[in-house]
Image (cartoon, helix red, strand yellow):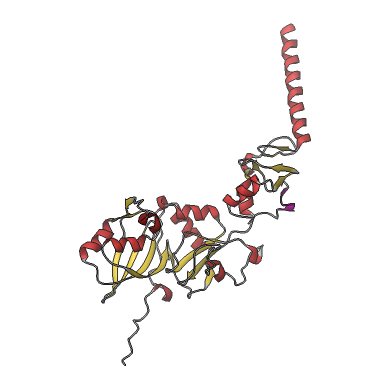
Amino acid sequence: MRGFRGQKDEAVMTKAIGGAKAQKQDNDGYSGRGAVQNDGVQDDAKLERLQKILAAAGIASRRKAEEIILAGRVQVNGTTITELGTKHDASRDHIRVDGKLLKGPEKQRYYMLNKPRGYVTTLHDPEKRPTVMDLMVKPKAGPHGDNVRLYPVGRLDYLSEGLLLMTNDGELANMLSKAAAGVEKTYLVKVSGVPPDSGLDQIRRGIVIDRGRLDEVRAGRRDRIVTAPAKLELVRGGDNPWYELTLTEGRNRQLRKMFEEIGHHVEKIRRIGYGALRLDVPPGEFRELTPGEVMALERAAKGKKVVPKKKLPEYAQLGAPVKKKRR
């Protein structure tokens, strides 16, 4: 009997301690890890890092969101958060930035833009040059309308043109940008002079180029790398031929560097393909991707094979050569 009473007393004490802990959690209503449900049990499946929640709501990029948190501009359930890494439930917690309550995550949007030459692939340019954001000015659908915060996936340099993806889906953008995914990107490239077959074979097999920006190379900090094998076909011959080139990586000014290594300057670059997508909008225009196209991008980002349409759209083809007028 004494042993039975001891076990009973211990069970009662354990239950009392557990009830006190649950009551304390109910009174607090919030813990450093994230949202707490009414019964004191956390739903870890719904917890996300605070900077990710801010980015999904269109407040800023994830990196900028971290700066906003560190600056003490974010409150969760009335408590100012100034450290990174805390997790919360956006559907339950009251999250405010500069006193304004978050309205919830933006609907994810995906667009194909045909970037013309003379535009910078960035959100803001300190030199005040036109940016790709200046082209995304037409009304767009979505719960936040024109306030949807879009950003480019990867980049095309100032003098390059063609297919550029614009989205607010940071996770997919990061997956597509990683070299490990091996997403194919196809370009039309016009070269000054006729490269030798031996040089073109070097590009196909993989060629040694300078890593990093040209100003770093000129400063003497040369770091040489070998490019991944590439697909290369002649599209139009002549004194300044056009080639179709497909890469699975996207290093800084890579196409220009590859041809410079075999002694030829690149005059024009137009990206016509990204995964299964093919450029089908006029220069300076954009369109929203279909659900099927988004699914194909997700497959490509996971390293799965995707197949583009066999028939190239008009804007993914070379136009008829311009005939020089006789004087």
Between 15 and 113, the residue placed more toward the observer is 113
Between 217 and 294, the residue placed more toward the observer is 217
Instruction: Give percent across and percent down for residue 99.
Output: 74, 52
- Which quarter of the figure is the C terminus placed in? bottom left
Eyeballing the image, is 314 above or below 289? below
Eyeballing the image, is 56 above or below 84? below
Instruction: Give percent across and percent down for residue 94.
Output: 73, 47
Eyeballing the image, is 115 above or below 298? below
Instruction: Give percent across and percent down for residue 313.
Output: 42, 74
Instruction: Give percent across and percent down for residue 49.
Output: 61, 44
Residue projecting furthest to the top: 2
Between 210 and 41, the residue placed more toward the observer is 210
Q: Is residue 288 left or right of residue 269?
A: right
Residue projecting furthest to the front: 219
Eyeballing the image, is 92 above or below 267? above
Between 149 and 121, the residue placed more toward the observer is 121
- The question of residue 40 being in magenta is answered with no
- The question of residue 98 being in magenta is answered with yes
Tell me, yes or no, if residue 66 can be seen here.
yes
Q: Which residues are magenta?
A: 95-101
- Which quarter of the figure is the N terminus placed in? top right
Q: Is residue 296 left or right of residue 322?
A: right
Residue drawn where x is 72% and y is 52% of the image: 98
Q: Magenta region's main secondary structure?
A: strand
Residue drawn where x is 78% and y is 35% of the image: 27
Residue drawn where x is 21% and y is 66% of the image: 196
